[in-house]
Amino acid sequence: MLFTVLLSKLVLLSTAVIALKAMTLTFIEDNINTAFSFDTGDGDPNPTALAALPKELYDMPAKLAMIASVISIFVAVGHLVFICKDWKKGEKTQAYSFRRNTMFLHLSNFIIILFSLVSIYITHKSSSHFFLRYVMRKAGRPNTEEVRYNLGRFDLETWSCELKDIPGARMVKEDYSRQCMVEAAGRWVMIPFMIVSFAVAVLAVWGMLGGRRDANGERMKTEDVGLEMGKLEGKFNAI
């Protein structure tokens, strides 16, 4: 029962991560070659066009999180299917080979999710910050019609959350504000995602190590359990 609840939560969280990271990648894809009129405040009738995204932008963490989420859905749904099919007898899900395989699958899945979580938080922590003076200096150069920010490397959360508060970017404030909330949600949802995957992995390890044991306390494999059950049935029939 606990496995079913945790696996169901894992599927729901995986779906949420996929949706949020898909919005991240879509925003990058849609705006990689676009720009907006940046108001430098100097009264210039021809305002500078600032590229919507910086030249250097982290996108691999979002892709890795999506991959981890897709893998989680396949692993969790596959495990749930076996649990539902074997609900009454429990022969397949209690088999030694099944418990061993699910343990390795869930452990591997947890490691991938943990790696994606760490990569997201590291890139967010190490992200550059927007400097208005840099844009003003580049915009002040002769014959400069479009400026692309090329100082440091950003994650999309830092870029969108800082641009939404820049006075010169008022015309795109709503777009950046919305994306800022999406990025923040996408980063924070990774924490319960990792916690649930860890709980599933721990439960899988416990299921593997806590199987049936013989009289000497040694773990018994599936065929040994079947042999012992056959002996017991023979004794009862003899009685």
Image (cartoon, rainbow, N blue to C red):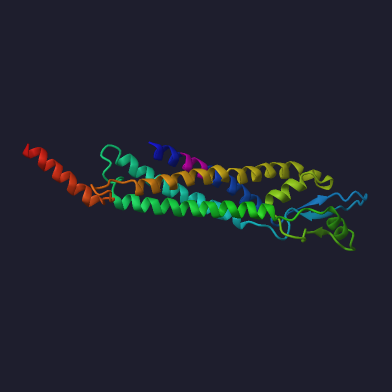
Q: Nearer the viewer, residue 229 or 133?
A: 229
Residue found at the very far right of the displayed protein: 43
Residue 153, picture quadrant? bottom right
**Residues in magenta, as a range:** 9-14
Report how many numbered discs are placed on residues in the image.
0
Residue 165's x, y, as percent? 79, 44
Residue 82's x, y, as percent? 33, 44
Quadrant (top left, top right, bottom left, bottom right) of the C terminus = top left
Residue 38's x, y, as percent? 83, 50
Left or right: 99, with 47 as reference point: left
Residue 157 visible, this angle: yes
Residue 3, picture quadrant? top left
Magenta segment, principal secondary structure? helix
Residue found at the very far left of the displayed protein: 238
Q: Identify the residue at horizontal 89%, vertical 62% (top origin).
A: 141
Residue 54, picture quadrant? bottom right
Residue 1 forms part of the magenta stretch: no
Q: Identify the residue at horizontal 53%, vertical 46% (top origin).
A: 194
Left or right: 88, with 4 as reference point: left
Q: Nearer the viewer, residue 217 or 239?
A: 217
Q: Identify the residue at horizontal 58%, vertical 51% (top origin).
A: 117
